Image: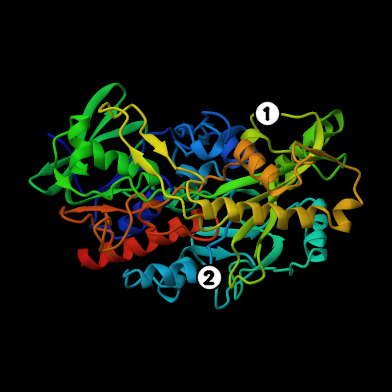
Amino acid sequence: MNPIFDYVIVGGGSAGCVLANRLTADPRIRVCLIEAGKPDNTPLIHVPAGLIALVPTRIRNWAFHTTAQAGLNGRRLLQPRGKTLGGSSSINAMVYTRGHASDYDQWAALGNAGWSYQDVLPYFKKSEHNEAGADAFHGTGGLLNVAALRSPSAFDQIFIDSAIQAGFAFNPDFNGAQQEGVGQFQVTHRNGERCSTAKAFLQPAKSRANLTVITQAQATGIQFEGKRATGIEYRHQGHAKSVRARREVILCGGAIQSPHLLLLSGIGATDELASAGIPLRHHLPGVGKNLQDHLDFTFVFRCASQSLFGMSAGSVWRTFKGFWSYVKHRHGLLTTNFAEAGGFIRSDPSLTIPDMQLHFCIAMVVEHGKRLLRGEGYSLHVCQLRPQSRGTVSLQSTDPMVPPLIDPRYLSHEEDMTAMVSGYKATRRILDAPAFRQQARQELFTHEAQSDSEIRHLIRERAETIYHPVGTCKMGSDAMAVVDVNLKVHGIEALRVVDASVMPTLVGGNTNAPTIMIAEKAADLILQQFA
């Protein structure tokens, strides 16, 4: 007989770990959390600098690829996604930003009551233990530790000084009263270690008798009785298994895998499912549509400095010393998240809110870190925050073990290229400011681009994702919406989606903190119904 739980959560990532904790805080509620990846039991996850080995490889990483992108000269881009407890919060750069307040007000304006900035701010604060203290915008006592970097690079200040010289303001808190400006990021660290959702939320709940966690278990389909979700089929250790849900099935697979599982289970556009040979369960044409992501361009400079990371005898020696500092005190070079500083800027002064995000990295980042360059150096990334291009996640095969087709359609909307060129030029002003100019450096890849046409060509040749896919099970009430404001799937009983896929529009910032917020709010919605 298949085991029965009140709730079955599919995906032990940024949202799933939050839900598992919050739901099982009520001892009456039995929860099963299913995760396709392995446990988060590798030092590469917990030592912050280990991300350099996680992002470009298949270590605890699905390492998906997009389809060939016409807007990027036919290139297929790597799309890293966490494949472990904690999901992408276990392999990301740990930057804690929430987006702009107006992003959430736009969600509400689109008809999603209860999702304005004032509605969601309490959930950001609930999850957070900010080491800088509580105020109108930040919480303390939450499970997710948010802190300043312990051992930031001295080179961060050169970036900040250059940005100020270029006319951009300093901002000590991107999640406070104002987002705009430059500074150092806060990160999801605790005592110099990564604070993923697995560590923050799941670890304290694992000993609860009412929580069952199954790893290396890939969901293959949703079980139904009519149009009511009743359980999950999954593959574990080479065997097909299933688990039943008395109350609800909750998908937390993220913007790539939640729509994939819905499509495999017969929920999607009728014609697409018919052409794939999958029997229709419910016509919901928005499944897998509305894919949005932050496209990112990187300037790379070689620069000999003891404050930078790289491939040289000196850097190897500093890393060795940093290892001992980390082992003894949880300080030093290995506490870096690489993207230590950055900011939110307006590429055009006539804009009312920032349209670009900067990430300043203390290493030369080329091809997600797969390509290593000799010497030390730095990178400055610029990404367009609110792209107009929309892509899709669709079926490649009816075999659930075959990844879906991921087509973000980067730069398919002409306004996005225009915005990227503006962002390129604004970032160039920072790189040409006196503080940067005073450093002996060698510019790689970008020094010859001067005209708009040359910049456009360079963007098509070199731009990459900065790993923020959202929107493929969007929240709303229009014909292309997949879930309602309570995150329940339209037309299906006892089925919710709780992850970044429900975002109707991409927020202006990193997406991990917003995903955690979504799960916090969803937990309250579910618990209110349970009561």
Residue lying at 55% horizontally and 71% vertically, measured from the top left: 138
Among the 4 quarters of the image, the one containing residue 279 = top left
The percent coordinates of residue 304 (x first, y second) are 88, 39
| Residue situated in front as seen by the camera: 236 or 303 | 303
Position of 460 relative to 284 (above/below): above
Query: Dot 1: few (<14), some (14–19), or many (≥20) neighbours within 10 Å?
Result: few
- Classify residue 452 as left or right of residue 141: right
- Numbered label attached to residue 101: none
Instruction: Identify the residue position indicated by label 2 in the image.
Output: 139
Q: Quadrant of the N terminus?
A: top left
The percent coordinates of residue 189 (x first, y second) are 60, 53
Task: Please indicate, yes or no, whether residue 460 appears anywhere in the rendered image.
Answer: yes
Instruction: Identify the residue position indicated by label 1 in the image.
Output: 371
Q: CA distance from mark 1 to mark 2?
A: 40 Å
| Residue situated in front as seen by the camera: 324 or 314 | 314
Q: Amino acid at mark 2?
A: Gly
Q: Amino acid at mark 1?
A: Arg
The percent coordinates of residue 423 (x first, y second) are 66, 55
Numbered disc 1: secondary structure? loop
Residue lying at 47% horizontally and 39% vertically, measured from the top left: 81
The percent coordinates of residue 192 (x first, y second) are 66, 49
Position of 178 relative to 298 (above/below): below
Residue lying at 71% horizontally and 63% vertically, measured from the top left: 182
| Residue situated in front as seen by the camera: 164 or 328 | 164
Q: Quadrant of the C terminus?
A: bottom left
Q: How is the image coloured?
A: rainbow
- Classify residue 244 as left or right of residue 43: left
Choose the circle earlier in sequence order: 1 or 2: 2
| Residue situated in front as seen by the camera: 6 or 75 | 75
